[in-house]
Amino acid sequence: MLRIAKKINRFTATAAVAVALTLGGGSAAFAQDGEYAILMKTLANPFWGAMGLGVEEGAAEAGVAYFIQAVESDQAAESQLNVCNTMLERKPVAMITAAINSTNLLPCLKAAQESGIKVVDLDGNLDPDILAAEGIEITFRIGSDNVAAGAQGADYMVSQLGADAVGAILVIEGLSGNITGQKRASGFADRLAELAPGLEIVASLPGDWDRGKAATITNDIMIRNPNLLGIFAANDGMALGAVESVFAAGKGGDVVIIGVDGNSDAVKSIKSGRLSASVAQLPYLVGKQAVENVQRALAGEDVPSNVDVPTMVLTQEILAAGTEPMLEFVK
Amino acid sequence: MSPQPNAVTKPGLWRRAQIKSEERLHVRLESLLVLIGLGVIMSFLSPYFLSVSNFLNILLATSTIGVLAIAATFVLGSGGLDLSLGSVMGLSGVAGAFVAVNLGLPSALGVAAGIGAGAAAGYINGKLVTRAFVPAFIVTLGMMGLARGLALVISDGRVIYGLPSALLYLGQGRPFGIPMPVIIFFTVVLITHYILAFTRFGRYTLAIGDNENAARTAGIDVATHRVILYTLSGGLAGLAGMLFMARINSGDPTAGISYELTAITAAIIGGTNLFGGRGSILGAVIGALIMGVLQNGLNLLAVQSYYQIMAIGAVLIFAVFIDQYQIRKAADT
């Protein structure tokens, strides 16, 4: 009998641990009517963190209930789909999603649409053609215009080097095949060719959004083109990797390095005079406006199918002056 | 009642239930109880948990990793290791989509290509382990990179979108309201459970894992058996790739990153010995379901995924702890 009691105790302990785990994970939130479901990639990246903050503050201001989920990494495609399906069980009124790629959430978004849930594409991760083929009608897409962001990068590069400059430029693309990275790189390349034909893009390579990989690419290209004039990277992480390589090679200050995102690491680097500029997206504003527009759509008002949130070029001067009104949204 | 002096000959209620569970289901009673306990807890914590649609949802979410956990159980049970499961799954999805979409060949060929690619990768693993004597850890670690890289090469780094409708049915069809991946998953579970628990092949597998030399002395062709096991493991990873591919209507070259570790975790929570000699398919499925229920419940409660990873890590250690505790206990008495 004692033995049995002992065994049972052990099972109780198992259950207790499970309860503790569950409760320790976070407070149990129960749904209210008209909840907004927000599904992000991962909050580990400051960009998504800022967007999440915008969503939270936007929802608080608008007085709507919401719940936000993210997955462990920005490559966890299936686990994001599973989380999405699970979120539908709470029967939200709107599903605001930042999909990991253009297809991983399709079945979930379809199911959401069939239950009359409004679907929003946060940051333009979904491909309009694929959506049309699947018969999914999203309420709206909100995000930065990535082609324009790339073009702004080219504008700044030419303003620094001069329209008559002749020399080599390196472009570091995003993850191969990722539409966002492609748009930024092509926006940059097209505008650069237009403004300064003398600046030649000697290489355009995928850095897979990876700081280390971007640093390696930069090293390799600097060996081939020691007189590299400028580097455009499709995000800040990669631009910062390029910065490390350029400074390690003793060429700090000679190469114009531009990133995209305007995240806090990039801002620090620009302030200390290492990174030349970053085309800042305003993720905080994207998150905030997403909630506001969903609220409008739910109230039956017209919302444009494509909401473009502006981008701005952050430089040392602009950051030092601090007078630019949009700076308050750089988080 | 005072402790019985002859307790060994008359096992207690708990011990009898344990033996029954082991004999009938080949499942450790503890893992079954943890799964049920978790379900009960989640039902109390979230009003959304206890519903047919959510249960189907959990099964659907578990189907891919469940198939991989079965693959892991076969290989681990024989004292091997397959770290290439996740990458091979990604490769298979891309191979299947490439054949069915880019080449425009019939869907059946797409499935054959997907599962075939997985089995081929597994066969190469098996040959390298048994004939070239490269350790399984190294071989499958290398295959992890080879398969992932090949998937990216074939697909040019992009998702291959737009499968023919027959393939889509495999992932999105719902005969009798039950998702196809769940039906396929259950079918695979029944077949593989039968193989591991009741056939000579299954017994040999665990015998090799328990003591390879003894198995060889007993006349088992260990090398051939291992090659078959790795091929089976690769083929199952290919099937998992097909299921996920069909679910998202595309071959994704980045699918299944680090799934091998999740699959091994599920197998071990389910009672498979990391060093071979013991393994159960139903156990692995219960292990996968424990993780599935945990994740689903925490998602419904809107708990961040970071805590979910912690919870699963804790469950893994706890499961093995219980196991070791009982083994030592049994050795003491």
Image (cartoon, helix red, strand yellow):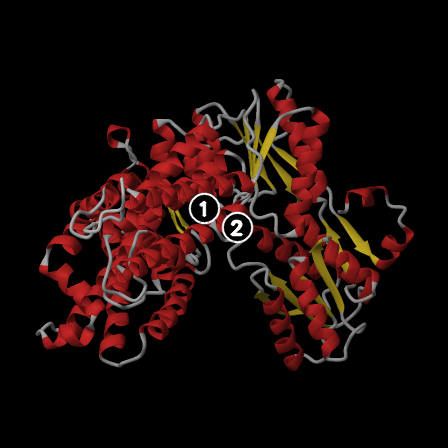
Q: Amino acid at mark 2?
A: Glu
Please give left or right for residue B314 compared with residue B87 in the image: right
Does residue B163 appear anywhere in the picture?
Answer: no
Q: Give whichever of B217, B129 is nearer the camera.
A: B217
Instruction: Look at mark 2 in the image and give the residue it sits on.
Output: A72
Please give left or right for residue B69 compared with residue B159 in the image: left
Label 1 or label 2, whichever comes before in sequence order: 2
Asked if A264 appears above or below A211 in the picture, the reply is above
Q: Amino acid at mark 1?
A: Ser
Asked if B333 appears above or below B296 in the picture, the reply is below
- Which numbered circle lies on residue A79? 1
Question: Quarter of the image holding residue A207?
Answer: bottom right
Please give left or right for residue A240 compared with residue B46 in the image: right
Q: Where does residue A183 sit, x and y in percent of width and height? A: 60, 52
Question: Quarter of the image holding residue A124?
Answer: top right
Q: Where does residue A147 sit, x and y in percent of width and height? A: 65, 50
